Amino acid sequence: MVGTILIGLMMVIQVILLCFLVLILYLLVRGIYGVPWVRTNKAFAKEMLEFAGLKPGDVLVDYGSGDGAITILAAEAYGAKGIGFEYLRALVLYAKLRAWMHGVSKKVEFRRENFLSGAVLPKADIISIYLFPEVNEKLEPLLVRDYPSGTRVISRTFVFPTLPLKATKKVGSEIIYLYLIP
């Protein structure tokens, strides 16, 4: 009896480990063909949101939201509404689970969409970005097209080609860039 239970428990552990391995491989392969997911830790996300001047009632849109860390923190700590765009289905599901666990699922939404497809982008007071420069270059005309003058764009590490730069802030070995839509 005990042997059967142990065998069953070992099989369950093996299935869980296999699922975890498949998820890691999926994220690695997707990262090779797009922008890889690199988590923004809570302290760095807080630096970004404070630097952007996020306040209660603001709407934050996070392009390439990954696991939703920035979007969830915006809702949880600042009272903002958040919309995250992420192409990887597994990360969208994980972000939704994290939002539920943090009690902010009514203040945030996560969309599995390609925001570069040309669709009209949602209203925002602040836009958060952690994408490669070549993606920023493609996204910039859409931001200028869909957001009013003065909308703040906060970017971790990577720059935009022509958006007016308002300020920079060095955090550790990285730089946060604050832009304004012209």
Image (cartoon, grey):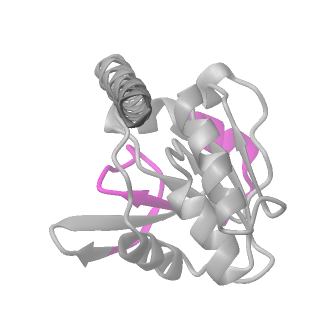
Vertical arrangement, residue 50 with respect to residue 101, above or below = below
In the image, 64 versus 30, the foreground residue is 30
Where, by quadrant of the figure, is residue 30 drawn? top left
Q: Residue 98, position in %: x, y?
A: 61, 56
Quadrant of the frame with the C terminus: bottom right
Q: Position of residue 63 (x, y in %)?
A: 56, 44
Q: Quadrant of residue 26?
A: top left
Specify the segment rendered in magenta. Answer: 141-168
Is 102 part of what is drawn in magenta?
Answer: no
Q: Which picture quadrant has residue 131?
A: top left
Q: Is residue 164 magenta?
A: yes
From the top left corner, tell me how far across and down residue 167 is, in percent: 39, 74
Could you tell me which residue is drawn at 60 percent across and 26 percent down? 116
Taking the spot 46% from the left edge, 77% from the top edge, the residue there is 46
Q: How many marks?
A: 0
Q: Compared to 124, does 143 lie above or below?
A: above
**In the displayed image of the protein, which residue is found farthest to the right?**
106
At 63% from the left edge and 31% from the top edge, which residue is drawn?
Answer: 115
Q: Is residue 34 visible?
A: no
